[in-house]
Structure formats: structure tokens, C-alpha cells
Image (spheres, rainbow, N blue to C red):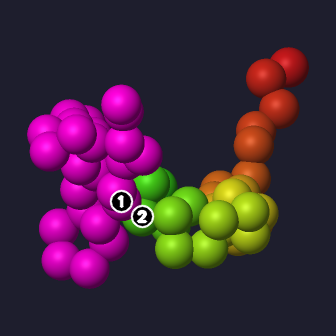
């Protein structure tokens, strides 16, 4: 039986599933995962609002 992954955000950001740490990528991916895990559903709106505005391509 598979277990749900555990997201750890106090200390180094980590995800553990079935006793194994998963590869989360670099620091940017880890920060994004931590922000989403801390405030699920709301963090994405904050991240988009705080990021640089999109530039028009043409």
C-alpha cells in the first residue's frame, strides 16, 4: 500500500514518500513547493502577484 508523501518545510524543504526522499530540483523549485505547501490554495495567488509582470512579446 502506497503512503501519501510528506512535505517538510521547517528546515530544508523535503518531500518523503515511502521512506525515500524525492528529488525536488534546485532552490527555486524548493521555494515554490514550500510556499504552496504552507498556504495551499492561496500561495499561488500571492506568488503570481509578487512576481514580475509579464512582458508583451510584440
Q: Is residue 20 magenta?
A: yes
Q: Position of residue 19 (x, y in %)?
A: 14, 45
In the displayed structure, 1 sits above or below 33; it is above
Highlighted magenta segment, given as a residue range: 1-25
User: Among all residues in the image, which is located at the extreme front?
Assistant: 1
Q: Residue at x 23, y 56 (%)?
A: 14
- Judged left or right of residue 23, residue 36 is right
Magenta segment, prevailing SS (helix, strand or loop): loop
- Judged left or right of residue 12, residue 24 is right
Q: Is residue 10 magenta?
A: yes
Q: Secondary structure at mark 1?
A: strand
Identify residue for label 1. 7
Which image quadrant: the N terminus?
Answer: top left
In the displayed structure, 49 sits above or below 58; it is below
- Residues marked 1 and 2 touching at CB (< 8 Å): yes
User: Of residues 12 and 27, which is closer to you in this image?
Assistant: 12
Q: Residue at x 17, y 67 (%)?
A: 12
Location of residue 23 by image quarter: top left
Query: Which mark lies nearer to you, 1 or 2?
Result: 1
Label 2 CA crowd tier, 10 Å (few <14, some 14–19, many 20+): many
Q: Position of residue 51 (x, y in %)?
A: 63, 59
- Judged left or right of residue 44, residue 12 is left
Any part of residue 30 in sight: no
Q: Position of residue 40 (x, y in %)?
A: 65, 65
User: Of residues 43 and 54, which is closer to you in this image?
Assistant: 43
- Judged left or right of residue 27, residue 57 is right
Identify residue for label 2. 34
| Mark number, residue 58 | none
Q: Residue at x 36, y 33 (%)?
A: 2
Amino acid at each position: 500500500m502506497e503512503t501519501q508523501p510528506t512535505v517538510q518545510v521547517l528546515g530544508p524543504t523535503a518531500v518523503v514518500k515511502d521512506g525515500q526522499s524525492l528529488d525536488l530540483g534546485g532552490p527555486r523549485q524548493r521555494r515554490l513547493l514550500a510556499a504552496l505547501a504552507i498556504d495551499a490554495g492561496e500561495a499561488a495567488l500571492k506568488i503570481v502577484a509578487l512576481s514580475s509582470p509579464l512582458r508583451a512579446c510584440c
